[in-house]
Amino acid sequence: MPAARDLSTLRDLYADVLCDARFTHRGHRHRPTPEPRGPFLKTPPVPEDRDATAAGLLLGAARHSAGRTTAVFLCSAASAAASLALPAVLGRTLDLLLRRSPDADPWLLACAALIVAEVLLDASVALLGGTTSARSAAWLRTRGVGRLLVAWPGHATRFPPGDVAVRLTANATEASTAPVSAATLGASLLAPVGAVVALFLIDPWTAATFLAGLPLLVLVLRAFARGSSDSVASYQRVQADIATRLVEALAGARTIAAAGTEARDRDRILAPLPELAAQGGRMWRIHGAAVARSGVLMPLLTVAVLAVGGIRLASGDMSVGELLAASRYAALAAGVGTAAGLLGSLIRSRSAARRAAELMALPAMTYGARTLPPEGRGTLELRAVSVRREDRNVLAGVDLMIPGGTSVAVVGRSGAGKSTLAAVAGRLTEPDGGTVLLDGVPLGALRRDELRREVGHAFERPVLFGATLGEALTGSSPMSEERVRAAARAASADAFVRLLPQGYATPPHAAPLSGGELQRLGLARAFARAGRLLVLDDATSSLDTVTEHQVERALARDVQQGTRLIVAHRLSSAARCDLVVWLEEGRVRATGPHEDLWRSPEYRALFAPPEAAEPTAPDLASAAASPTEPYAHVAVPGPTAAEAADR
């Protein structure tokens, strides 16, 4: 299923990149993780992120481009000042020209200079605004990706890939305009306020006429702000829903084509379109209504100011130049109605920032400062470990001691908690209660590089990152070419890689790999980085029996010795391990050698086909006593002499 593949892909991604400091959040500090207190800890301790709110995120974006944002404000303010000076200068120039005064020439030059300055300043605002928004968008996206990569995988995967893509693209773009919109809005209010003051200086009656209509404008803008916030949030939510469905369909394109369900899946993807159209229509109706009302109200106020000014001119209380200046100032004061557009931009930015901030609020993995004792052999200990997911105990009070250098199979039915136990053992998830220790040191107290160097992982569906296959196998740890090839040979991958036209220099996307070949490359990557603990989470499920046996022999002989924790579904995998941990409903039902557990009918039922009939007691006894005889069409229950020698 696409969702399962996405989960596995992200889990593999985190295991590979968490050891690379390049992906560390800039403000993240490594500090020891205190051991959990009490029987049950709801969430792991994480460093606080002061910007993990919409307001904090927008302020952070403004701080990131503080210089450019300040320049936008200053240029906008200077443009507003030029626009405020221009009507007074024009009025003075007109009066001088009507009187045929020789002093009119300097005033004409001043008018031309103010007009040119206003044009240049507006162009500067447009240029600086575009670059500032682009820088803010890049900062938001980098921050979001960085937070995703340092977050606990279990928390991060609650966001579907399509939703994450929308949050990091469209939402980040909308949120990035907030600093420029706020700076422009603040500066744009200078002109109306200054224009009203100028009207008072020219003639108080004209100013009083204009102010009489402002309460209506305030009501219009207030209604616009209230209605827009909800509609914008709903629109962005539906937009993310469509993107999520599309990404899932693209991931399962072959399945859709094979099933012939193109029309059905197209309808499923586009099903939210009517709601998207409704929310979009509602959003723009609110915006249009506010613009229309302010667009009607402002000209009416301007006409009223001109009418009062004409009366004052007829009575001799105003000059022609003052009337011209009053009309221009009335137009500038009416520009407060354009604040609706900037206010709408800020509302959309705030709503988008809320969605982006949810990524920033993901709990980040923390690390300590301790190292492992040099003489350790990979002893793994779980003390009362509990993991809870959606009000269900996935693991419940697991106590387990695995001696160093032991090969351990974890078996159980689907949902028993096998993969969760593997994730806890490798610290890809933090237990809600209890402690996990490696060679006596709590995993949460280890340094990042120490933990990721000594604990390796291989997954059912590995993902290869890097420009070439060779780079994908090395990961972030520098290692020799011979070591990489030796690991590939151990995973039975070297032969088919060398057959590729470019060998290990082949880009991963250009290599036609089957599921089994991809899984072998994932094993090779884990083998190359094997330390004290190697966790194989169903990492051989796509291999045929012969290849699996070859890989297990190489793992025992050619890979650096350490503890092996193997999530096993095949009987042969469990039979070849030194110890078996049998999980049932999140608890350890039994531990011991495979040969001992095989005496239990319920244990044997784990590996039997669902339709297989329960054999009689004599059949069970003969199967346990004679491992060379097949039991109920399943593989050999115990290790052969050659396999015992391999171990």
Image: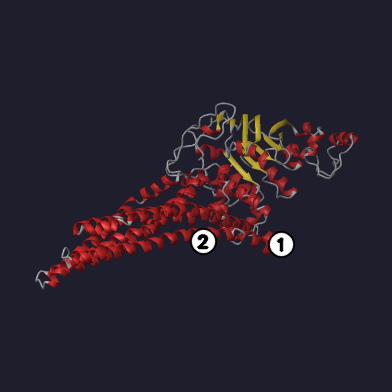
Q: Quadrant of residue 425?
A: top right
Please, what secondary structure does the residue beneath circle 2 have? helix
Q: Position of residue 570 (x, y in %)?
A: 75, 43
Badge count: 2
Identify the mark at residue 281; answer none if there is no mark.
2
Q: Position of residue 415 (x, y in %)?
A: 70, 40
Q: Residue at x 71, y 35 (%)?
A: 585
Q: Residues within 10 Å of mark 1 (few under 14, many from 20)?
A: few
Under mark 1, the amino acid is: Ala
Label 1 close to label 2 by CB (< 8 Å): no
Q: Residue at x 44, y 62 (%)?
A: 288
Can residue 492 be seen here?
yes
Q: Is residue 72 left or right of residue 528?
A: left
Q: Position of residue 119 (x, y in %)?
A: 28, 66
Foreground residue among 301 and 40: 301
Name the residue beneath numbered marker 1: 258
Q: Is residue 122 left or right of residue 379?
A: left
Foreground residue among 594 and 221: 221
Q: Quadrant of the C terminus?
A: top right
Foreground residue among 340 and 575: 340
* Mark-to-mark CA distance, 1 and 2: 38 Å
Please, what secondary structure does the residue beneath circle 1 have? helix
If you read the primary sequence from the N terminus, does the residue marked by circle 1 or circle 2 appear first?
A: 1
Q: Quadrant of residue 155?
A: top right
Q: Residues within 10 Å of mark 2 (few under 14, many from 20)?
A: some
Q: Residue at x 63, y 42 (%)?
A: 559
Q: Position of residue 294 (x, y in %)?
A: 38, 60
Identify the mark at residue 464; answer none if there is no mark.
none
79 lies above or below 642: below
Under mark 2, the amino acid is: Gly
Foreground residue among 198 and 111: 198
